[in-house]
Image: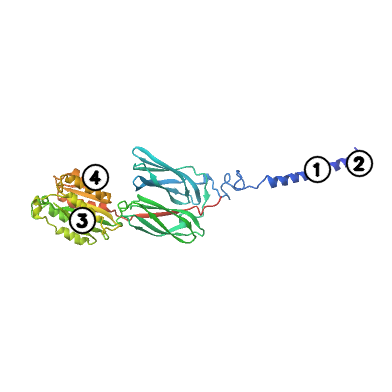
Amino acid sequence: MDISRRWAFYRRLQYGTGFGVFWLCIFSLVYVGFFHSPANCYDGRQNADERGVDCGGGCALICAFDVKQPTVQWSRSFRVTEGQYNAVGYIENNNLEAASSEVPYTMSLYDAEGLITERTGTTILPSDSVYPVFEARIDTLGRTPTQTFLKLGEITQWVKAQSGRDQFTVQSRQLLNADARPRLEATIYNEALTEAKKVEVVATIFDARGNALTSSRTFIDNFAPRSLEEAVFTWPEPIAKTVRSCEIPTDIALAIDLSGSMNNDGDTPPQPITSVLDAAESFASRMQEGDQVALVTFATQAVLNSTLTGNVGGVAQAVAELTIDPAEETGSTNTGDALVQAALELTSDRHNMEARKILVLLTDGLATAPDEEPEAYALAAAKAAKAKGVTIYTIGLGENVNMDFVKQLASSNEQAYAALTTADIDRIYRTITADLCEDGAAVIEIIPKTDAGFSSL
């Protein structure tokens, strides 16, 4: 090949190469502009500094293998009204930063016959603490749940959270009208510098041993940063009997049998009445500050000897001064009217709406007045008292008392006592004192939760 032809070949090669490079550059620019995107957290691939596909590293999503799975601490149902229950479960999230805005769950309620009903839903789970799941007003079809189970589903998205339980602080709380329409008022402070929306707040009351007794829920729609908000929780039925802490006061009516048979043991002073009155006097004097005591006696008729009063020493003295009317040696025992009188006083205007209502009745015989069916009359009076929220304790004294009847009068078999001798009476009164309220304060736990501090996807 001569020089001129060789030069022409190389010239064409250069032009071809340049032309190819030119169109390669054009194609690359078009591809980059229209078809290629840089590595990011939404491209469905593990690239850049990601620890998994679109998770970890600089991504908002946290990889599931870097997360400790949350656990259910406990779950329970609480009666709201007849046939309706609130169900609550506590979930523990041990992850310092990982949170989820969509945790699926199933709440299942059972009784002895099996499954009553289920509720499914999703909940927010902030980081690094324990948070409640709350299902309101579950219809139990007239059945009473004895077991409640909370089961968590698969959590598919975990994100970083800038704050957890420390975002909110409860600065005050006050439980009002515990024996009427209970109302818990709380003041909550938002520590964050950003607004929180749709804040769910759950209040749960525990006894001194840490057992959950009841729960309620409210919402704060808009919670401004660094501000206070009032949260109000309500219950449609009294909770004074449910919350057995001694912080809840007691209104108590003592009903004492003064029929003639209470002298039948003879002796000087007469028995068993003397031991009964000594024990009842001690019982009345053991009431705490804030408690009120009333006194009812009964034989052929029932008498309200002392209305509800905080002067428990005065009532104790009145008990000590009681005597049996000689005319009652041949009289009757009107147990039913004693229950009526005591219940009327416990539900009168003198009743403290913060207090539980307690009736303690002691008798040594059968109900023999006021009509042809005195026991049926007394049982109807006891049923009416219980319907008004009165808890009835009964003490049957001696060998001749009808204990089946005494147990039916009481609110439960455990609240009916048999005193075979006068030596048993003081012990029983002391047992009732201990049963009225438990040592230690009730614990009211208020937990707000929101996804305001979660990283955006």
Which one is earlier in the sequence, the residue at label 1 or at label 4? 1
Q: Can residue 286 be seen in this view?
A: no
Q: Can residue 103 be seen in this view?
A: yes
* Label 4 sits on residue: 413
Name the residue type under label 2.
Ser
Which one is earlier in the sequence, the residue at label 4 or at label 2? 2
Q: Position of residue 304 (x, y in %)?
A: 18, 57
Element marked by disc 3: helix
* Label 3 sits on residue: 283
* Label 1 sits on residue: 17
Q: In this view, does 96 lie to the left or right of 146?
A: right
Q: In this view, does 38 lie to the left or right of 319?
A: right
Give the residue at x 67% y 45%.
36
Q: In this orientation, which residue lies closer to the viewer: 254 or 373? A: 373
Which one is earlier in the sequence, the residue at label 2 or at label 3? 2
The nearer-to-camera label among 2 and 3 is: 3
Q: How crowded is mark 3: few (under 14 residues within 10 Å), some or many (20 or more)?
A: some
Q: Is residue 134 left or right of residue 17?
A: left
Are dots 1 and 4 in contact, CB under 8 Å?
A: no
Q: Where is residue 333 in the image (x, y as percent from the top left)?
A: 14, 49
Name the residue type under label 4.
Asn
Which one is earlier in the sequence, the residue at label 2 or at label 1? 2
Label for residue 4? 2
**In the rendered image, which quarter is residue 291 located in?**
bottom left
